Image (tube, rainbow, N blue to C red):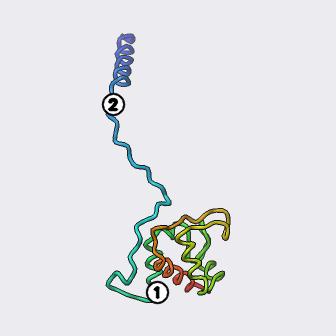
Amino acid sequence: MKKIVFTLALASLAIISCSKKEEAPEQPKTESNVMLEEPKTAQESATAGTPEEEGKKLVEGADCLSCHKVDAKLVGPSYQDVAAKYTDADIDHLAGKIIEGGKGVWGDIPMTPHAGLSQDNAKLMVKYILSLKK
């Protein structure tokens, strides 16, 4: 009796493992650093505010907060640390860094580029960050 049960179990296992399986369609692989769709500026929405408010909305709508915090280092520097290091004279430079990415100023971990972001929106983001100066 044990031999029959064992033989049936073994035969079932062989049939299941040899049967042709339908493969699920391959799922596209997603990356954590994929550039999200560019957030809309306040000029494009019904409510307009100061450049700093517009910049804050852009930062919150993008992937920035996955690496940066306002008051503490996460992967990248805190916004307050950036604001302490730079002035309004650096707005164009910092906007370019957001768009092109960079490495070396704050350590070895590179900032991913945000090539889909417009220069104007990047400047609004920088204005918001610089407004956090202590």
- In which quadrant of the rendered image does the C terminus lie? bottom right
Quarter residue 57 falls in:
bottom left
- In which quadrant of the rendered image does the N terminus lie? top left
**Point 55% across, 68% down: residue:** 100
Picture layout, residue 26 above or below residue 128: above
Q: Position of residue 126 (x, y in %)?
A: 54, 80
**Residue 39 bears which disc, if any?**
none
Tell me: 48 left or right of 67. left
Picture layout, residue 119 above or below residue 35: below
For mark 2, give the secondary structure: loop
Which residue type carries mark 2? Lys
Tell me: 105 left or right of 18. right
Q: Position of residue 107 (x, y in %)?
A: 67, 66
Q: Position of residue 104 (x, y in %)?
A: 67, 67
Distance CA(mark 1)–CA(mark 2): 57 Å
Picture layout, residue 3 above or below residue 78: above
Which of disc 2 and disc 1 is earlier in sequence?
Answer: 2
For mark 1, give the secondary structure: helix
33, 8: nearer the viewer: 33
45, 99: nearer the viewer: 99
**Residue 21 bears which disc, if any?**
2
**Point 46% across, 71% down: residue:** 117
**Residue 51 bears which disc, if any?**
1
Q: Position of residue 81 (x, y in %)?
A: 63, 78
Q: Residues within 10 Å of mark 1 (few under 14, many from 20)?
A: many
Tell me: 132 left or right of 40. right
Which residue type carries mark 1? Pro
